Image (cartoon, rainbow, N blue to C red):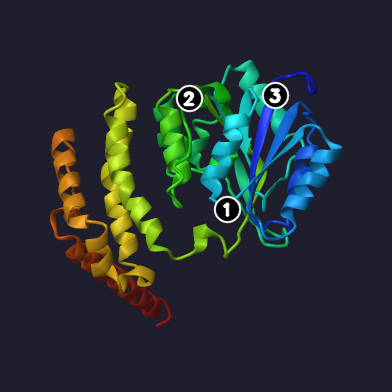
Amino acid sequence: MIDLINGPLVSVIVPIYNAESFLDECIQNVKSQTYAHWELILVNDGSLDSSLQICYRYSESDSRIKVINKENTGVSDSRNKALDIAQGDFVIFLDADDYWLDPCCLEKMLVKAVSENLDLVRGEYVAVGMKGEKLFSRHASEQKMKYAYRVLTSSEFLNYVMTGDFFLFLSLIRKSLLTDIRFETNRIFLEDMRFYSLFFLKEPRCMYLPDLRFYAYRKNENSVSFSINPKKLEDSFDMCEFFHERSQETQNKQLKKFFQEYSISMYYYTLETLADNMYYGKARIYIKKFSLKQKRMFVLSWMKSYGYIGKSVIYHVDPYQGVLLFRLKYKLAKLKNRVLTCLKFR
């Protein structure tokens, strides 16, 4: 059991930009939690609607709610400003257009964090539409379930639980491990991946709770996550250097291996994105702009130093040739599907 009123303080951080349609629901879900010892830090990021007024209305009636009002500098800077003043023993992030489905989620995560001396507790999400209608629910794979409800190391958590899903809002995090960690403010993509990676260098004690599907993740097609933006490509390619640098900072062999593999695979997966229709028309421009020929040479040199065998030809050809190979892969896949469909209905 845990004291619901005088237990560890939790800082709930909510960056806000033009969220007047969803903000009441978001805040009310925090206020309705069974666990009451929290502070809610609302960061208004230069909203042009009534979001700021809504924030002040709630702060005036509840001393646990704090408001930061600033010019529009982006979600990463908003989170950093909140982290700078957060007083909690633990931190959890919440987007202003999302909400929590479970009124006991903070209590459940804290019970595990305290009883098992954990630094990170992670649950799951349910995808909802703009009106809150349920779209689908995330269920843990058989592989993930093998690692559920166990105290895990950084490398175990990264490899077997996260498996590429760097969703920051699913985790309750011990704040004392975030003293020297902040979000990069010049990024618009994969900020959570960077933040998590720096955190896992601290080698925290982690636990995954797959049955705690507490987070309602609103699928907003107007958000940055769904938009076409060359800056997202640049941020993704830059993860190659980021992971290589992290691999140099740890002596943990499993963690080092994880970072090494990601420093290589981020080149492959981002080049594949460049072959998609939304970017392909300007592929040559992006290849030059992001210095991908030089980046590929870096990746090849890292592969050699790691003793990593890159089986894909993508690493051994010019970036534009790699893009063309991915295009050919797409066309062959479509042709295969058409043939199979024809055979099925003959």
Quarter that holds the N terminus: top right
Q: CA distance from mark 2 to mark 1?
A: 38 Å
Q: Marks 3 and 2, how far apart in space? A: 24 Å
Above or below, comparing residue 113 to residue 165 in the picture = above
Q: Is residue 337 visible?
A: yes
Question: Residue at 73% of width from left, 51% of height from top?
Answer: 52
Residue displayed at 34% across by 61% down: 273
Q: Do the residues under discs 2 and 1 have CB atoms within 8 angstroms?
A: no
Quickly name the residue at label 3. Answer: 9
Q: Earlier in the sequence, mark 1 or mark 3?
A: 3
Quote the CA–CA distance across marks 1 and 3: 29 Å
Q: Are marks 3 and 2 in contact (CB under 8 Å)?
A: no
From the image, tell me which residue sits under label 1.
72
The residue drawn where x is 52% and y is 35% is 145
The quadrant of the rendering that contains the C terminus is: bottom left
Of mark 2 and mark 1, the one earlier in the sequence is 1
**Residue sitting at the far bottom:** 346
Secondary structure, mark 1, is loop
Disc 2: which residue: 152
* Residue 216 horizontal/vertical position (percent): 67, 49
Relative to 261, say whether 181 is above or below: above
In this rendering, the label closer to the viewer, 2 or 1 = 1
